[in-house]
Amino acid sequence: MTDGAGVATTASDTRQSERKVILASSLGTVFEWYDFYLYGLLATIISAQFFSGVNETTGFIFALAAFAAGFAVRPFGALVFGRIGDLVGRKNTFLVTMGLMGASTFLVGVLPSYASIGVAAPILLVLLRLIQGLALGGEYGGAATYVAEHAPDGKRGLFTSFIQTTATLGLFAALGVVIAIRTAMGEAAFADWGWRIPFLISIILLGVSLWIRLQLEESPVFKQMKEEGTTSKAPLTEAFGRWENLKWVLVALFGAVAGQAVVWYSGQFYALFFLEKTLKVDGATANILIAIALALGTPFFIFFGWLSDKVGRKPIILAGCALAAITYFPAFQILTEAANPGLAAAQARAPVTVIANPAACSFQFDPIGKNRFDRTACDVAKSHLAKAGVPYVSQDAGSDWATVTIGREVITIANPQGGLGPGMKAAGIPARLAEMDAALAAAGYPAKADPAAINKPLVVAILFYLVLLVTMVYGPIAALLVELFPSRIRYTAMSLPYHIGNGWFGGFLPTTAFAMVAATGNIYYGLWYPVVVAMITLVIGLLFLPETFRRALHPSA
């Protein structure tokens, strides 16, 4: 056997080279995902540290929006670094992206809080998230392309599935660090300053990652194209300015990646936020439960990548989307019953309804921190329930008064005149709110999940199922995208749909879903977002997405 330069090699040498490529590419990408996802894990604490100038619900949604900001710019990073990767090479491009990611993460760890520097704190935080997003936009396509171009025909699904584990392993690593530090120093100290430690550690990971990546050589496919002079001179124009390539970008986005993205972020991040914010499971317990599910589920990335080499990429990805669309609502309802049985029982025994004129009800999200939700009876009632974390349904009525039913209890709230102060007191609102709190307590609505009542095996089982769906849609996606596009524009062409799908459809999922919940009071309403997107991907994928697993990769492909 000879290598690309005609030098004799043995099967053992080839296997060692393959292992080195997979290990080096995967480890570097794990560290980069660790950096990126630390923010998501600590969203509740970051909300208190950097968005303390607004009310709690708005602050949390703002924190999620800042989390999403990193995703918003990922497609632009894909364009910038994808073009560089197709022009100058895969290896050097993802060295640059890694440096940007590591430096930005470290700086989050030393950033002053809102209490120290005011509004400059969230502005700087968002700026660092944007840099992280740009870096990640160039990282994934490079790593996936690099590994795929080293893989033999018939094993690309298996080889690239190791790259697919890196996002979950990075999340798992971040969870492990957060859990360890939280446990060692206690919740109070961690919330005060200890949350910075996981960000500061990233500077060490950056050094290790750069050293690992420097050991690699350029992709053999790119080297061959370079030697033959067949690299693209204008990858952006060639990838997106020609319909024969652009159509596959659109098919990849809507027929595969959009559904994959919402399943990924629902099964890992939204599930975590749902446990912590909606079901009021304490942060440390929620982190441990999701970490166990991730540990159990991660090997299935490899399994479904391997299986896609046998049966194809398309049926596995679309089956994952179909299962998600069908089962998300019952799965999250069972999760509620297992994680906070008190809340589930109270909802069943004494459901809460707000009966009011819809014209007098505001959208319960305040982007500038000025709205007190105290001008109408409907706003007073819904705002109070939202702060208490109590789910409710709305019912239309002609009256400007608001009637809140909690099981058989009925509390009527008059419209306040002039908002807080005398208007509130004159309308008897403080007394009505106290009456509402007493009725909620009598109905069994818990202030937080009872740790002793959590059915942890069932919670882990549901979380494992959600992660299993993630592995179905995500395990084969890299191989599919690599095979879908010609080698000369592969880095650019595959990166854009991947990062639009995961950056926009997936990255905005927690923010959008929680805003939907805040607007309706229905804790499951946000699930309509991933369900609808997954269904759209299923239909478009069935109609237009080609099967690619038998395609060969070579410079002229």
Image (tube, rainbow, N blue to C red):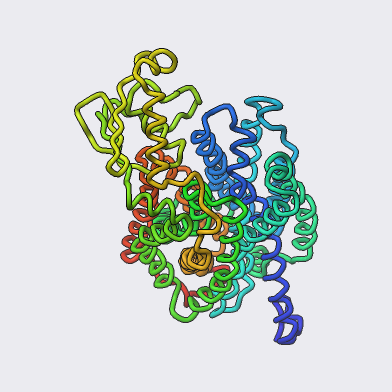
Asked which quadrant contains residue 3, the reply is bottom right
Residue 484 visible (yes or no): no
Residue 129 visible (yes or no): yes
On the picture, is 504 further left or further right than 251?
right
Residue that appears at 62% across and 50% down: 81
Q: Which of 428 and 131 is in front in this view?
A: 428
Image quadrant in which the N terminus is located: bottom right
Q: Where is residue 227 in the image (x, y as percent from the top left)?
A: 68, 66
Q: Where is residue 528 in the image (x, y as percent from the top left)?
A: 35, 51
- Tell which residue pokes out farthest to the left in this image: 398
Placement of 127 over or under 507, stated as above or below: above
Residue that appears at 45% across and 41% down: 389
Placement of 467 over or under 114, stated as above or below: below
Number of numbered discs visible in the structure rendering: 0
On the picture, is 305 further left or further right than 193?
left
Q: Which of 405 and 107 is in front in this view?
A: 405
Placement of 241 over or under 110, stated as above or below: below
Q: Where is residue 361 in the image (x, y as percent from the top left)?
A: 32, 29
Q: Position of residue 45 (x, y in %)?
A: 62, 41
On the picture, is 120 further left or further right than 209?
left
